Structures are given as structure tokens and as C-alpha cells.
Image (cartoon, rainbow, N blue to C red):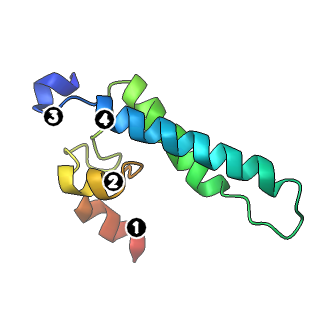
Amino acid sequence: MSQKSLGYPPLAPFRVELETLYQQLASEARLAMSDPRAVIPLHDLRRCVQALERIGADQYGRCLDCGECIELSFLKADPTTPYCMACTGKHLG
């Protein structure tokens, strides 16, 4: 099912935001590799890549657990989130 049939707004703003975030995180990771004390943001980088992959697969905005639409406000707060609010609660505890 395409995003247009889900009633989602255009994904271009999310794609741009995620691509910008990816570039920032990748840059931080490259810098951190030269400093043994630095923390490399691999988890954040992985989530960003996975979100971009979901956009490419026309699955962005669908919860990986229940398949329901992720709340737009939730996506705006964290565009890398793979879960809706209800399923995120299940993963947190």
C-alpha cells in the first residue's frame, strides 16, 4: 500500500530531514573514530539508515510491530522511530 493511499503528507520533508541527520551522524562517526574516548553514534546512525530504507520501500510511517500508521506528531518528534506510540511503550518496558 503506498503512502498516498495511507493519507500521509508528502514524505519529502522527512526524507530531507533524515538525509541531513544521516550526514551529520556519519560526520560525527568519522571524527569519533580518530578519538578513542569518543562515543560513536552507531545506534542513531543505524536508526537513520533504517528509516531511509523504509522510505525507499514505501513502508515509512507504518509501525514495524502492529502495521498501523505511526502518529504524525510522533514522526515529527523522532523521524527515525519505527514504532507507533502504543508499540513504543511495549518496547520501553
Given the image, on which type of amino acid does mark 4 rest?
A: Pro
Q: Which residue is identified by label 1?
A: 91
Question: Residue 54's spot in the image, x, y percent?
Answer: 41, 33
Which corner quadrant of the image does residue 60 belong to? Answer: top left
Side of 20 relative to 70 (left or right): right
Q: Is residue 78 visible?
A: yes
CA distance separating discs 4 and 3: 12 Å
Q: Find residue 83 and name its label.
A: 2
Q: Which residue is identified by label 3?
A: 8
* Image position of 67 with respect to 84: above or below: above
Of helix, strand and loop, which one carries label 1?
Answer: helix
Q: Earlier in the sequence, mark 4 or mark 3?
A: 3
CA distance separating discs 4 and 2: 19 Å
Question: Residue 62's spot in the image, x, y percent?
Answer: 27, 41
Given the image, on which type of amino acid does mark 2 rest?
A: Tyr
Q: Residues within 10 Å of mark 3 (few under 14, many from 20)?
A: few
Q: Find residue 38 and name its label.
A: none
**Tally of numbered discs:** 4
Q: Is residue 50 visible?
A: no
Q: Which residue is identified by label 4?
A: 13
